[in-house]
């Protein structure tokens, strides 16, 4: 991509983020007693619960508004309120990391640290704009700083395993210093073989994952704060039942630097980051070789810088303003390596570069004791280009030729000017209740795959559309939260009207000029509408607790009067818990109804899905002052099931499965020592 001043500015800096006040929606926090929600990224955040799973994102399965799409043993893709992939933004301690696989084997959530177990927040609308507008949703992962409590060292070690797939994991973190100056080293390793589903069929899901992280922080007497981090993650031999390829190698390097200091009635903060991902996928390293050996080498590089000024001039007003810049570079080439000399079959991501800059301002105010309001505005400039669009790939075709033949596109670069904003209000009602109304406009630029994917082989084609318009979301949400005695509740209704929704669709062989036996995947803009309801009812007396959660969403393609793809069915989760003297046991029942409102033309829905009910039990028990035993019995009744949004099973050795099935009955256990 051509070098610009913006690109040079970002490329010369590394990473970080600091404590900043904001108004944020959390699915798990009671917000009724706070004026303005303060989310802390790293400095004073609560320590996340330790997880026995290799991917912390699995903790979100307790939220029925979140579905996880499975393709294999790793790389679970979150879908929030029926929207996923490019519509879900993931912030890892303030860092935005892009995946390096065109087929999304490595979504950003796969890079959450299992050794440090970050806390997870799910944001569903623009109640802050500091991280960009929320199209479908945002997942904010926050890793807490070490807490020393007067000691000079602190840390933890966890070892565990699972019987289904013979999974093993070990992770550790150790810090030395004080609350004002510290150094921490953490790392982990997990591996597993293929697991069995409830019918006893092997599901391609084996994987190996290793991670290491070094970070340190320092705070001066006048509250100047500096924190730096570097990390490395290596994934090896990851198998996927939901893909025609596996991933023998993926490496991720992250760097971040954060600075902050007090100023006036608040503080300023600066975050800079760099993220580099190298990914290889093929169809021969981990499975029998077919007629042709195909391999895709892909990389992505991200550089970012964010500056925010946060002020609280009075006890009734908070405001913030800031600017951020980011550059991304993607490159992916599909090779035919059957012969002695590899041959380029497709320039899947033909040297795509994106530069974006944004500026925002937002403010929150309390009006008396019974109401608070907030509003914000953000402008983003995005420039994208495919620098290799004129290079010849497979079959003597260039990506520019493919874009022109499919969409009549003569100009490959794309420039977007977007304005997003929100307004919110909360009213205190009698009996400890609060009514919250939020309206917002969120504008999303199409992603690298949606605009520039250029895969064309003898059997299929998958071509992006450079002339796609930006996606405009107009959201309205009404929530009533309250509590009385041991009870708490929160019903929510919401609507999302979308102009120029980016829809992926698939043409069958012989239809509309498609001459590929495997079909042709394309993109277009449509008008869409999503409607949803959610409800949460909880009770606790300190020893026993119960929680009921329900979520339903309906998505409509308003141009063609048919359902949107990848919309989860009605989901309900019931939990019953007991805790006493540090011991806890929880039973969970996950229910979903049948989903037959599907869009087969998208190529994303694997067909109608049956309903299911899955029962899980877990517990945690202190053995000594430093040692804790955790256990879980997943899928107690050994059901065969899969979320509706999971990938279509493309494993030739298990052709009967429509989707990638979840594990059958699984026993997991882990021992954790903390000091």
Image (tube, rainbow, N blue to C red):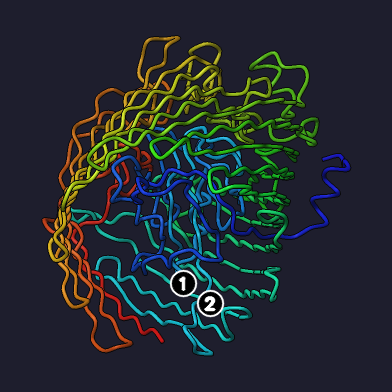
Picture mark count: 2
- Residue at x-position 39% and y-position 23%: 495
Depth check: 376 or 75 in front? Answer: 376
Task: Name the residue nearer the viewer: 600 or 643.
Answer: 643
Q: What element carries label 2?
A: strand
185 vs 417, left or right, is: left
Q: In which quarter of the image is the C terminus?
A: bottom left
Q: Is residue 619 left or right of residue 449?
A: left
Q: Is residue 525 left or right of residue 32?
A: right
Residue bearing mark 2: 186
Q: Is residue 170 above or below residue 395?
A: below
Residue 299 in the image, given as x and y percentages of width and height: 67, 51
Quadrant hosting residue 619:
bottom left
Residue located at (51% from left, 66% from top): 44
The image shows residue 532 at horizontal and vertical percentages of 32, 27
Q: Residue 545 carries which label?
A: none
Indicate which disc, 2 or 1, sits on the residue closer to the N terminus.
1
Coordinates of residue 22 in the picture (x, y in percent): 54, 46
For the residues bearing labels 2 and 1, Cβ distance under 8 angstroms: yes
Q: In which quarter of the image is residue 592?
A: top left
| Location of residue 124 with respect to 75 vertically, above or below | above
Residue lying at 65% horizontally and 15% vertically, measured from the top left:
407
For mark 1, give the secondary structure: loop
Density class for disc 1 (Cα within 10 Å; few <14, some 14-19, many ≥20) is many
User: Is residue 100 something one can see in this rendering?
Assistant: no
Residue 115: mark = 1
């Amino acid at each position: 991509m051509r070098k610009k001043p913006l690109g040079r500015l970002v490329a010369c800096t590394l990473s970080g983020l600091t404590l900043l006040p904001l108004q944020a929606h959390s699915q798990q926090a009671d917000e009724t007693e706070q004026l303005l929600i303060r989310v802390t990224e790293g400095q004073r955040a609560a320590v996340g619960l330790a997880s026995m799973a290799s991917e912390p994102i699995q903790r979100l399965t307790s939220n029925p508004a979140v579905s996880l799409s499975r393709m294999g043993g790793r790389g679970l893709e979150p879908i929030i309120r029926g929207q996923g992939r490019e519509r879900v933004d993931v912030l890892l301690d303030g860092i935005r990391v892009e995946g390096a696989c065109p087929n999304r084997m490595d979504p950003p959530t796969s890079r959450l640290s299992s050794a440090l177990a970050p806390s997870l927040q799910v944001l569903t609308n623009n109640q802050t704009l500091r991280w960009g507008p929320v199209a479908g949703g945002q997942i904010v992962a926050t890793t807490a700083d070490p807490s020393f409590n007067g000691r000079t060292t602190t840390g933890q070690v966890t070892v565990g395993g699972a019987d289904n797939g013979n999974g093993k994991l070990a992770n550790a973190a150790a810090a030395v210093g004080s609350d004002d100056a510290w150094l921490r080293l953490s790392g982990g390793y997990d591996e597993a073989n293929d697991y069995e589903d409830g019918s006893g069929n092997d599901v391609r899901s084996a994987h190996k994952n290793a991670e290491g992280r070094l970070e340190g922080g320092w705070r001066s007497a006048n509250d100047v704060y500096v924190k730096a981090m570097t990390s490395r993650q290596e994934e090896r031999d990851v198998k996927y039942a939901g893909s025609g390829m596996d991933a023998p190698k993926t490496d991720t390097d992250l760097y971040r630097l954060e600075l902050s200091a007090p100023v006036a009635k608040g503080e300023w903060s600066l975050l800079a980051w760099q993220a580099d991902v190298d990914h290889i996928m093929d169809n021969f390293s981990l499975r029998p070789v077919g007629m042709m050996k195909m391999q895709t080498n892909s990389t992505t590089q991200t550089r970012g810088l964010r500056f925010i000024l946060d002020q609280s001039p009075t006890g009734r007003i908070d405001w913030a303003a800031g600017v951020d810049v980011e550059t991304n570079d993607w490159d992916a080439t599909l090779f035919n390596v059957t012969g002695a000399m590899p041959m380029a079959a497709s320039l899947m991501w033909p040297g795509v570069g994106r530069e974006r800059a944004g500026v925002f301002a937002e403010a929150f105010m309390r009006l008396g004791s019974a109401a608070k309001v907030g509003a914000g505005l953000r402008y983003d400039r995005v420039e994208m280009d495919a620098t290799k669009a004129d290079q010849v790939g497979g079959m003597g075709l260039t990506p520019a030729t493919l874009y022109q033949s499919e969409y009549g596109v003569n100009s490959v670069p794309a420039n977007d000017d977007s304005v997003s904003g929100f307004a919110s209000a909360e009213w205190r009602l009698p009996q400890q209740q609060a009514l919250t109304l939020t309206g917002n406009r969120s504008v999303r630029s199409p992603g690298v795959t949606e605009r520039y994917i250029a895969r064309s082989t003898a059997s299929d084609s998958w071509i992006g559309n450079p002339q796609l318009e930006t996606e405009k979301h107009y959201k309205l949400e009404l929530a009533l939260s309250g509590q009385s005695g041991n009870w708490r509740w929160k019903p929510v209704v919401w609507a999302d009207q979308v102009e120029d929704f980016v829809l992926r669709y698939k043409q069958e062989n012989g239809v509309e000029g498609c001459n590929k036996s495997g079909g042709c995947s394309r993109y277009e803009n449509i008008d869409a509408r999503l409607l949803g309801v959610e409800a949460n009812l909880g009770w606790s007396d300190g020893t026993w607790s119960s929680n009921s959660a329900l979520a339903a969403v309906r998505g409509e393609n308003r141009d063609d009067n048919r359902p949107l793809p990848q919309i989860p069915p009605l989901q309900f989760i019931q939990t019953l818990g007991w805790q006493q003297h540090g011991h806890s046991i929880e039973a969970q029942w996950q229910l979903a109804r049948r989903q037959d409102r599907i869009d087969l033309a998208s190529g994303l829905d694997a067909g109608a899905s049956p309903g299911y009910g899955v029962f899980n039990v877990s517990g945690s028990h202190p053995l000594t002052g430093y040692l804790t035993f955790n256990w879980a019995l997943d899928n107690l009744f050994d059901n065969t099931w899969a979320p509706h949004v999971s990938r279509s099973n493309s494993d030739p050795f298990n052709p009967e499965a429509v989707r990638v099935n979840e594990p059958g009955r699984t026993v997991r256990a882990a021992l954790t020592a903390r000091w």
